[in-house]
Image (cartoon, rainbow, N blue to C red):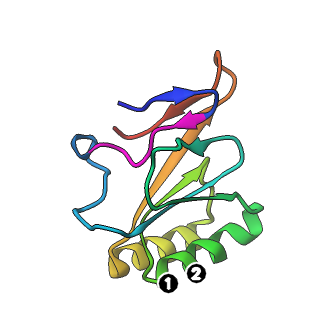
Amino acid sequence: MIEQVANTLQLPLPPESGVASRGKTKVWRYLLASSVTFSKEVEYGIRIQKPCDLKLGLWLQRLIVSRQCATIYVENLSLSKTEKHSILQLCDGYDVELVNLIVDSSSQGNVVIGPW
């Protein structure tokens, strides 16, 4: 279960969610977001202010090929079809999980919607 308090999410997700790390240890988890953060208890988590949509694909590519991360969480991920295809191939090749955190700010407080 995701814990949310004032735009703070408890990430990484638990193993039973189906989208958690594949057993890697001491690898970085990145969060590219504008309005959500990791909780303080998250180890090896780096939050980066989400870049504009024009730069997002390039940033994701650089994070993936750096071989320094297991999971990248992106708030309201939006990529072109070409970028999406390229990023998904890189994720497969470098064993990186990409999680789209859809934040619905129109409801009471922010609500994160995911595949879990």
Query: Does 11 lie within the magenta span?
Result: yes
17 on left or right of 7: left
Residue closer to the observer: 114 or 22: 22
- Range shown magenta: 8-14
- The total number of labels drawn is 2
Vertically, is 101 above or below 60?
above
Residue 52 quadrant: bottom right
| Residue at the image point whose x is 45% and y is 29% from the top | 3
Give the class, few, some or many, for how many residues have Cα within 10 Å of label 2's Cα (few <14, many ≥20): few
Is 19 drawn above or below residue 72 in the view shown?
above
Dominant secondary structure of the residues highlighted in magenta in the image: loop
Residue 14 placement: quadrant: top left
Left or right of 51 on screen, residue 63? left
The percent coordinates of residue 48 (x first, y second) are: 66, 60
The residue sitting at 54% across, 76% down in the picture is 63
* Residue at mark 2: 62
